[in-house]
Amino acid sequence: MTTAAHQQPATDKNASTKGAISIRNVTKIYDPKGANVLAVDDCSLEIAPAEVCMIVGPSGCGKTTLLNAIAGFHSITSGQIDLDGEMLCGPDKPLADQGADRVVVFQNGALFPWKTLADNVAYGPIVQGLMNKADAREKAISMLSEAGLSGVADKYPGEVSSGMARRAEIVRALINDPKVLLLDEPYRAMDALTKSIMHESLLEVYDRTRVTIFFITHDLEEAIFLGDRVIVMTTRPARTKKIVEVKINRPRDYRLLSSEEFRILVQETKEAVHEEAVKAFEAGERELA
């Protein structure tokens, strides 16, 4: 275990060499001339290529603000974010350009209900002019098959389960071979059984692609099961409080959940998050007083 904000996890010889994220001294202030809300304060974090980096912390602590800054949805006030050594945002460029090298999957599904799963997956490369319709559809069907969705490729989102739709959405995110997959609580609304299936499905995708994953969650077991490291953030404003190293070999499956090593890591993470949750609650109480 470590609390050093800049230590990177070891990566094996088969790991990707793309997708390194550097967050250095990032601060974000919302409405600086009005409410002046400090969401992120001098936050630094290094994420290695092909790392599964799980971000946990109290609600409203600034986790999604960081994700949105990486994606290019929100500007930063100061500091710098780099991807593979190239600046995304920083001095004189507070807002990162959006690009196919960083793809976001949010909690609420975003598939087009009037398109089949295959057409949803193929949509991005077609509209970006990267592939013609036939090639994009062929690749979409192939990737859906790899994800266990070959039998439902021509069905519409409303005709399949939520788990299948979410798998298709992740396939859609990966079809352009991004450097980074940004996930904001994608499985939060799912029941425990569906969530466990989705976890194993995501790990299968990761083992094939070795894409860097920046994953926000409130589920601490999810964080340990999926992650190489779990970053515990402070209550707002967000800073790195603690980094939990998950030195558990891959590939992983559900049997890990009953291991003593897993339970110890969950408890360590829970204690760090609980400290911040108490601070967030007490701050809220004072604001209401």
Image (tube, rainbow, N blue to C red):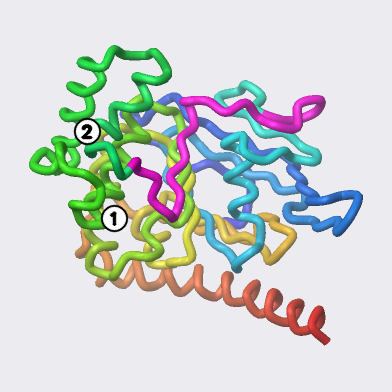
Q: Which quadrant does the C terminus fall into?
A: bottom right
Relative to 277, say whether 97 is above or below.
above
Instruction: Report x, y in % for residue 27.
Output: 77, 46
* Residue that carries the numbered disc 2 in the rendered image: 118
In terms of image quadrants, where is residue 281?
bottom right
Residue type, mark 1 in image:
His
On screen, residue 209 versus residue 238, left or right, reads left
User: Does residue 188 show up magenta in the picture?
Assistant: no
On screen, residue 245 versus residue 36, left or right, reads left
Going 81% across and 79% down the picture, which residue do you hit?
287
Relative to 172, say whether 277 is above or below.
below
Give the camera-side residue of 188 and 222. Answer: 188
Q: CA distance from mark 2 to mark 1?
A: 22 Å
* Residue that carries the numbered disc 1 in the rendered image: 199
Going 42% across and 59% down the picture, which residue do you hit?
223
In the current view of this chain or complex, which residue is farthest to the right? Answer: 33
Relative to 119, say whether 234 is above or below.
below
Give the camera-side residue of 236 and 130. Answer: 130
Whether label 2 touches label 1, CB < 8 Å: no
In the current view of this chain or complex, which residue is farthest to the bottom? Answer: 289
Q: What range of the chain is rendered magenta? A: 89-112
Relative to 44, say whether 236 is above or below.
below
User: Does residue 97 show up magenta in the picture?
Assistant: yes
